[in-house]
Amino acid sequence: MNLPHLVRERPAHALTLAADGSAGVSLVDGSADAELLWSVLVPLFEALIEPIRVRAAAPAKTIDDQRRLWCGIEERYRLFGIADDALEIFSFGGGWHRLERPGQQRARLRLLGALTAVNPLQLVARHRSLQLQALMAGFAKKAKTGTALARRVLTRALQPVVSGYFAGDWLAVLDYLQAPPHPDEEVITALPEPRLYVGMSAQAAGMAAEVGIPEDEIHAMLAAFLGGPTSLSPVEARVAALRDWWTAFDPVHAVQRPGMRSLWGLVDNELMAFGPDEHGFTQQLYRQLLPASVNEQVDRLWQSVTLQRHAKSIVSNPRPHQLMAETLGPALEFWHGVALTAWFVCEGPYSRAPLSGVADDYGRPLTALRAADCPISPDLFEELRIAELHLGPEEAIVKERRKLPVGTPIGSFTLTMSQSGGSRREGFERVRDIATRHRRAWADQYLDTYLQQRWRTALEDVARFHHRFVAAKGRPPTLIQFAQFATAAANQWTGGDLGDLYTAIGEPAPAQQERPARLLPGDGCDFARRVYTALAGIAVDNDLRMNQLEEAQRQWQLTRLAVESLRYLQLYEALGQPPTPKQFVSARLAWPWPGGEAEGWPLFQRTLADLTNTSPPASEPAAETAEGTPGPPESTKHVLAKGANAPLQTESVAVRLITTGAPIDVSAVLLTSHGKVRSDHDLVFNNHPHHDGVRTSSDTVTADLSHVPDDVHTVAVIASIDLEAQPAAVFDHHCRWRTETTQPSVTTLSFEPAPFTSGETVSIVVEIYRHASGWKVHAVGQGYDTGLAGLATDYGINVEP
């Protein structure tokens, strides 16, 4: 829905920003706004901006498919009463592919102008009419021998229609259609209220007295019902652990004083670093400051999870303290955040918000706490505002001070040099005590209520989803279907065990999950650090960041791979075998080796196999690479294997594409060391044929390497089938390409990949990249079955057909 705004405000990046900002809509809480958005507004906006969306995606595979698609769009626009010429340039055969990027942006703006010219009430009324016509057509299709059952009529597309225009009431739909209910129709006017089986152990004594049997027998029966060693449910065990954790967490903040290190790292979050930090972050600080018994309890209760896409198994959780913090939720986010803000405002070096801005900076958790009827007193914010006014003046924090003796003809003196970073202000203890007093008052009044609200809301939401599923489908969900809406609650409150969650909501589990052997050897952060070291990671200090930017970037990429190794092990456990690159989605990561992913992926897998004492996965022999220093030219053509590299001279280089089977466009993308474009101008193609030393012609990309800017690390050569000319074509054994890379002083380098087999229409041909003080060419041959949109995702460009 934000796409029209972005088209006007950020025309060059509107589609990418809209995709990045997309979000799902949760209807569990029955929010009227969410219902309106999902059932009425989203379908309306999707219909109106469909021409823009279709032109931003890869085209339909055949000409007939494209014609049918655009005929449908044109008919909907006619029925909306939108001007006939609004779609002229968008429609099939209208010349969209001949427009340069600015022309496409202007076409989108003209379309929005045509839409705004239509009376909005007329537009909404006609859309409602179209939606109701679709509902009637769907009903008639299924009602050939009488009234159809609701579950046979209500497809995914028609469910919003019934929700938006009939409040989800099937009887109201039948009344509108003047049709009697089907004799077998079970119209549910109200879902069952959730009934939770949590907290029964506390009632054991009363139950024993009521039925006249020993309390121990009641506990034994509850343990059998819950499937655990005690009568304490998994949820109760975690609630008790959260209370214990809070009891240990509070005094750590209460005794914080100047001269100590900051408490950034006391609560585990997504941040993971392996080098020195100059801003006060300490990895796993909770291991040092919280009691061992508290940490061990967290490690044990949150040590396993279910992966939503692989719900048949319960796997290791490498970050139990992070999951515990998510379980504790907005109360922890707020109170820990306030304490850190107080520290960084007073003790420096920097704070993202002043004390007077705490209410705004933590607006999201504050809203959640008010919704839970556990609000923060407004007096806290007023006291913090006043305390900030009485803090001492800012004092520069001196990191380093050196004295240098200086001699001159007229005498000697000492030159003092100091390096400062950030500032501090006197008065932390007063601010700390304000936060501590309010935190303890809030905990005394609300903590028990808050914890109960946390688990009860999570479990009741799951129960309601379960009831909705049964009502809609006429049967309970499978384990995999249940996992789609129950995984988050299971991970937080039952250790990822969906069976325990079924028990808690009083429903039978359709299947048992497996518990594969744990591959993670010990603590997840420690393991990731070992992976980082094994991949040749080094500590990144300020000197490296300032003076060796490319190496610092490479180390950041190794850090990302080390963190992602934890997800790799989870997938390994769930699948029962090492994940493939596709299962791991390796293409979304940067692989900081000369051979890219082709070189890095096998090394990554071998490293993890060594660290987990597992067998390395079977793989194809690595392609040989032509390494070495540039030398004199050879007299014969040199053939590159896929994944191979060869040196180039720093002079002009031409990559020529020789093709068979279909018309193919050649283009080039200029990439930074991050693997992303600097701007849209870094795409060099037929409508933008030269940029920063790189030029394209009909079948050749030429790069003058001596004139390529220093911030360009790689020039990727791209081949894409002209789908306007031959819509059904794909790269296969009929449609193939090969390249010849030539320079004046170097032999011709030839590369031809094996035929593609997965419907690819776009391919990265070769990459010309910086290496040491020179350049190399890398034979890539990677295809995309997602068309130019898939390439755009990797390179950060907005490619449109």
Image: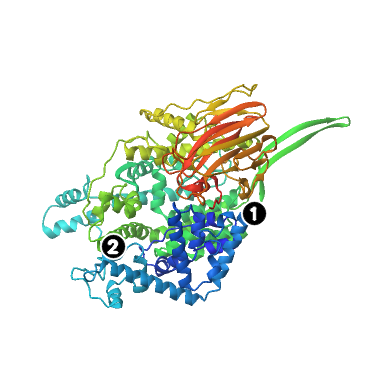
Q: What's under tag 1, amino acid-wise?
A: Gly
Viewer-side residue, 557 vs 380 = 557
Instruction: State the residue lying farthest toward the left.
Output: 212
Q: Is residue 263 visible?
A: no
Q: Residue at 75% of width from left, 32% of height from top?
A: 404
Depth order, front residue of 313/122: 122
Name which quarter of the figure residue 465 lies in. Answer: bottom left
Q: Which residue is mark 2?
A: 468
- Which residue carries the number 1 mark? 392
Query: Is 364 positioned to the left or the right of 707 in the image?
Result: left
Q: Secondary structure at mark 1?
A: loop
Where residue 286 appears, as percent x and y from the top left, is: 44, 43
Would you identify the image quadrant in which residue 523 lies? top left
Depth-wise, is mark 1 or mark 2 nearer the camera? 2
Q: Position of residue 451 (x, y in %)?
A: 36, 57
Q: Is residue 785 above or below residue 34?
A: above
Whole-percent x and y of residue 685?
Answer: 61, 46
The image shows residue 586 at horizontal and vertical percentages of 45, 40
Packing grade of label 2 (10 A; few <14, some 14-19, many >=20) is some
User: What residue sits 42% from the left and 69% below the top?
Assistant: 40
- Amino acid at the residue labelled 2: Arg
Comes first in the chain, label 1 or label 2: 1
